[in-house]
Structures are given as C-alpha cells and as structure tokens.
Image (cartoon, helix red, strand yellow):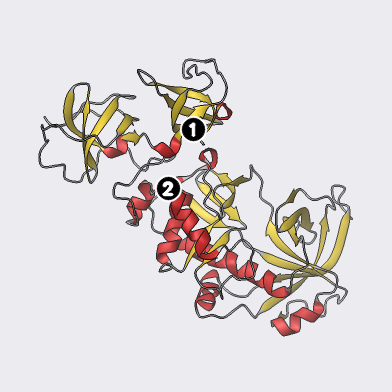
Amino acid sequence: MKRTKYNVEADGYHIEIPYTCSEVRKLINEGKHIDKFKLKRERIEARSASFGKGGERTAFEGIFTKSEREIVLKRFNKERKFDVFIETIEKQCVCSSLAIEFNQLHVTEKQIQFIPTTLFISNSFKGIYDEKILNKKELEPLIENGIFLVEPLLHGEFIKFNCNNGNLWFDSYHATLHAFSHWSWCISNHQLIIVDLQGIQIGNCFYLTDPAILSISENKFSNSSTNLGEEGISRFFETHYCNQICVALNINTDLYPKQIPDEIISTETPVNEKMSCVSQEPSTSLGKCVVLHPFKAEEINDLNLEKDDIIEITAKEGDWWQGRCKGKEGIFPRNHVQEFLKVFQFVCCSDYHAKNKDEIDVSVGDLVYLLGKKEGNVRVGLIGNEFKFGFIPFDVVQPIN
C-alpha cells in the first residue's frame, strides 16, 4: 500500500558496493576503480516534488518499502555517464576512510562522519539478479529507466560549513571541519584536499554529504565539476587560518597559530614550560587580544586576568605568551584569550539596541571584532575609545569590503 506522503513508486535494484571504505581508498591510490556491485531487489516510494536543488543534483525524499528506511534520492540535473556515479561513491568512501582516521586522533571531542552513498536503478528484470554481484560491464545494460544516488535521510538543519573555492563564512565556521580539510591535504602527502563540507550537526557529530575532493592529479576525480584542482587548493589556503586543532595535529603553517572564534579545545592551564623570564624592555606590539576565560596568577611573573581584559601582546612562545595588561607586563596562557584578527573585523550595517544584559548597543558604521557565536547571535568587541563586549544578532554585521 502506497503511503500518502509519496506519489511515485518504482521497482528496481538497490546497489551497494562489497568494499570497505579503506579498500576503496586503496584502489583509488593505485589508480583503479570500483568494479563490483551487489544488487538487491527493492521497491521505492518517493515524492515527485524535490526538496533541494544544487548546481549538479536535485534531491527527492523517499523510502525503501521493504525495510521502511527513509532515504534521499539524488538525480543529476544533466545526463551523466555511469562513471560519474561510480566516482561519486568512490569520493564519499575516500572521505569516510579519512574521517575515521581523523576521529581516531582524538584531537577534538567533535566527530566527523560521511554518510554512505549507494545507487538505485529502476528496471523490469524482477528478481533475476537479486543478491547477485555484477561487474560494471554486466551492470550497465540493466539501467533501463534511470539511476539515482541514494543516501539515508538526515533530519536537522542542513548547513554548508565550507566550500571548494575558499569562501569563509563566520556564521557556519567550525574549527574541527576546517582543520580536517587542512589535515586531509597533509595526510595525503599534498595530493588532495577535502572541502565543500556540508550536512547536519547532532551533538558532537557532523554528518556530511556531497563533499568535493580537490586533486593535484588530473586523472583523479576528474568527472566532478566541483574538483577545482590546484586553483581550488590555493584558494583554500588563502583564507584558511590555522586554529588550535591544527596546532594539536602539528600541521599549523602560521608562525603563530591563530585561534578562530568558535571552538576552544581546552581552558585548562597549559603544562608546557613557561618563558624563562619576562622582558621589562619596551617591546614591539604583536597585536591585541581579549581574555575569554579568567586566569589567576600562579607565579610572580604571571598576569591576573579577568574576562574581557585587553592585553597588548609583546611576545609569543609556545603555549605561554607575554603581554601588558592594566599596567603590568607578564605571562599568560594563550588558550585563555582570543586575538583580534583582521579577517574577523566587521562593520555594523544597522542600528541595534540591547534587549538584555548580555547585549550591547551598536550603530551603523561601528567597527567590531567577532569573538564568538551562540544561537544566531555573535559576541563582539566594539572598537572605540574603550572596548565594549556583548552579543548582537549576526545579521546586524557584514564583512568589511
């Protein structure tokens, strides 16, 4: 019996691959491709109206009637050869294999999971090939009435966290995902980078789909229009700022790794050795930072810090930095502060009047530094004769052109 929410049904085969993600990754590294496909007779019901359309594919909500698993059926907007479907599955497997390896490093409490991608072909061959394993040459003639990519249906707010051309959005920024992209470049020996990370977040886990792999090799992932190759890789690193997770992975490329306003790995006092002494000579300023977490001095050279104190940074060395705060020069832990980064200097595009004690008033044209985010609001430092700190709605600010 057809369910009322669906108005289309089709018989055919659900096609899975009898490989692990690690095996697929090994095949790709060897210049080979998937060539085994396991077929299972299945019926689907779906909605004829799509719920999402991208540059390459259109998505439809559906269900496998036997198992009653909710699924997403994705169809390419233009006709594509079967190799493109195979490459899409291979790409998802490579990303999944690398995500598993990344999660095992335990550099962040966040986890990354790429959801599995399979295929569905509609045809009239009934159960002839049920539970059979066919190669590509044997399978292609069975594609009578179309082919779809199949994924589990995700429930939650769908977010695009980064893209394949280097664009950076503060409202959807997550340090874990940007560090994962950077790490994929390093772990692949500078052969590829995984970007275009998108999906949903449930608790501490990101469930991702439709990634892009930018490859140095012209022979790998060449069927995908999202593979911008070396140009896309260069664009990523033009806007990527190494964060604390990059530091933990030992892949930071900046001389002084920057903590982006999103995820603080630890607010515990660093155990690494402090600077041997505090210089009392006039020092060149290396910029300013704001205290996010109070710090109580443990030794004579330490600074006592309260939340929202402003520090003039005069030296950076490991986990302990030196600076001036409230007339005193001293040492402080860098993971308790947030640098004022030019990349996160924004301008207010409208007036806003505080509605509670955590918010601040801003006017059109005010310059602010973005320091954090919470439920559609951003915590900012208002630049003026004195800094003021508080929350405002994210749509009140925009990047400085």
Q: Earlier in the sequence, mark 2 or mark 1?
A: 2
Q: Is residue 332 left or right of residue 339?
A: left
Residue kind at label 1, given as amino acid type: Lys
Q: Foreground residue, 335 or 290?
A: 290
Q: Residue 168: x, y in percent?
A: 51, 45
Q: Residue 216: x, y in percent?
A: 49, 69
Q: Secondary structure at mark 1?
A: strand
Most extreme residue toward the front, as rendered? 401
User: Quadrant of residue 258 in the image?
Assistant: top left
Q: Residue 257: x, y in percent?
A: 32, 47
Q: Residues within 10 Å of mark 1 (few under 14, many from 20)?
A: many
Q: For residue 109, which numbered disc appears in the image?
A: 2
Residue 237 appears in the rendering = yes
The image quadrant where one finds the N terminus is bottom right
Query: Contact, CB < 8 Å: mark 2 with mark 1?
Result: no
> To which residue does mark 1 refer?
373
Residue kind at label 2, given as amino acid type: Glu
